Image (cartoon, rainbow, N blue to C red):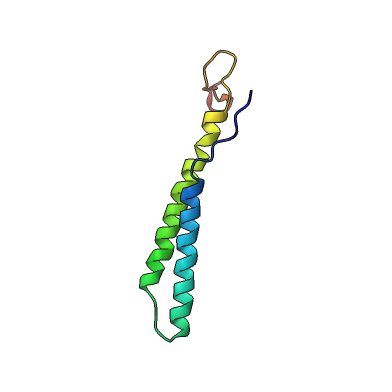
C-alpha cells in the first residue's frame, strides 16, 4: 500500500510567500504616498529566506522516497570519476 507524499515544507513556503507579498504591498503603498520604504524591503528579504528554507525542506523528500538498490546500499558508484 502506497502512502501519500509528504507535505513537508509547504506551510513554511506559504508563510514566506505571504511575507513577500505583504512586504511588496507595503512598499508600493508607501511609495505611492511619497515616502521611501526601506524597512519593508527587509520583510521581502526575510520572506524570501523563509521561502527558501521551506523549499529546501520540501526537496529533502526526494531522498526519502527513493527505493534502495538491490544490494540494500543507496549509494551507486559514479563511473565518470573512476580512473582507467
Task: Please tell me in which quadrant of the rendered image residue 1 appears.
Answer: top right
Q: Please state which of residues 82 and 53 is positioned toward the viewer in this rendering.
A: 53
**Image coords of residue 14 (percent x, y):** 50, 53
For the point 45% across and 74% down, which residue is it?
27
Q: Please state which of residues 51 and 14 is positioned toward the viewer in this rendering.
A: 14
Q: Please state which of residues 72 and 82 is positioned toward the viewer in this rendering.
A: 72
For the point 41% across and 62% down, which residue is it?
45
Residue most toward the bottom? Answer: 34
Quick check: 62 above or below 78?
Answer: below
Quick check: 45 above or below 65?
Answer: below
**Image coords of residue 42 (percent x, y):** 38, 66
For the point 43% across and 64% down, which residue is it?
44
For the point 47% across and 63% down, which residue is it?
20
**Image coords of residue 7 (percent x, y):** 53, 40
Image quadrant where one finds the C terminus? top right
Residue most toward the left? Answer: 39
Quick check: 46 above or below 32?
Answer: above
Amino acid at each position: 500500500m502506497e502512502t501519500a507524499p509528504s507535505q513537508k515544507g509547504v506551510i513554511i513556503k506559504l508563510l514566506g510567500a505571504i511575507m513577500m507579498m505583504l512586504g511588496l504591498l507595503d512598499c508600493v503603498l508607501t511609495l505611492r504616498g511619497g515616502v521611501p520604504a526601506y524597512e519593508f524591503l527587509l520583510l521581502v528579504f526575510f520572506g524570501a529566506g523563509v521561502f527558501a528554507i521551506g523549499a529546501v525542506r520540501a526537496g529533502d523528500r526526494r531522498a526519502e522516497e527513493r527505493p534502495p538498490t538491490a544490494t540494500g546500499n543507496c549509494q551507486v558508484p559514479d563511473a565518470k570519476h573512476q580512473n582507467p
